[in-house]
Amino acid sequence: MNASLTVRTCSPEQTRALGREVGRRLWLGAVVGLDGDLGAGKTCFVKGLAVGLGLDGEEITSPTFTLIAEHYRQGAALFHIDLYRLEGLGAEDMEELGLEEYLSGRGVSAVEWFRFLPAGLLEEYLLVSIRFGPADARVITLTAYGGPYQGVIRQLGEHLSC
């Protein structure tokens, strides 16, 4: 069974703060898949994730046109991948792009438009689904696929509880 946690954030600052808390609990080789409509806050979440990894969140921008942005600092590495323009590509196409190398453990990979990743490419990952709520609110559901990510969900739940 996959553990999940749903959180409501009321501002971009709160979305970044949630991303930061997730980033603090990740390790080299962790993969975070992000899904949500355009403008839902995927890149905002990744900015916080970067801070949690010890990187400068202000350097993070959407890699829609570059496809992959690499960020490094003192042993921390974040690979920010955007699959928006790659919908419909198969596993062979992704292999040609070298995507598997980024997902192989040299850093933390944050993959926007995760649903465009070919099925079966990954068995273990943390899925972050961001939906629009009322006003500036977002409803963010984090779902763990695989044992290591279950611990992330548990730790976040403990951190966020009263």
Image (tube, helix red, strand yellow):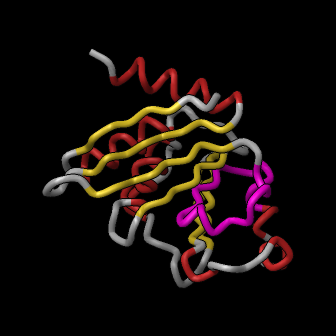
**Residue 75 in sight in this render:** no
Which residue is painted at 59% across and 36% down in the image?
144
Q: Is residue 23 magenta?
A: no
Which residue is painted at 68% across and 29% down in the image?
148
Q: Quadrant of residue 123?
A: top right
Where residue 101 sits: x, y (%)?
A: 81, 62
Is 89 rendered above or below residue 8? below
Is 100 rendered above or below residue 23? below
**Residue 116 in sight in this render:** yes
- Does residue 18 appear left or right of residue 138 in this picture? right
Q: Quadrant of the C terminus?
A: top left
In this orientation, which residue lies closer to the viewer: 126 or 134? 134
- Does residue 162 appear left or right of residue 71 in this picture? left
- In this picture, which residue range is highlighted in magenta? 102-122
Q: Quadrant of residue 147?
A: top right
How many marks are shown on the rendered structure? 0
Which residue is painted at 33% across and 42% down in the image?
17
In this orientation, which residue lies closer to the viewer: 13 or 137? 137
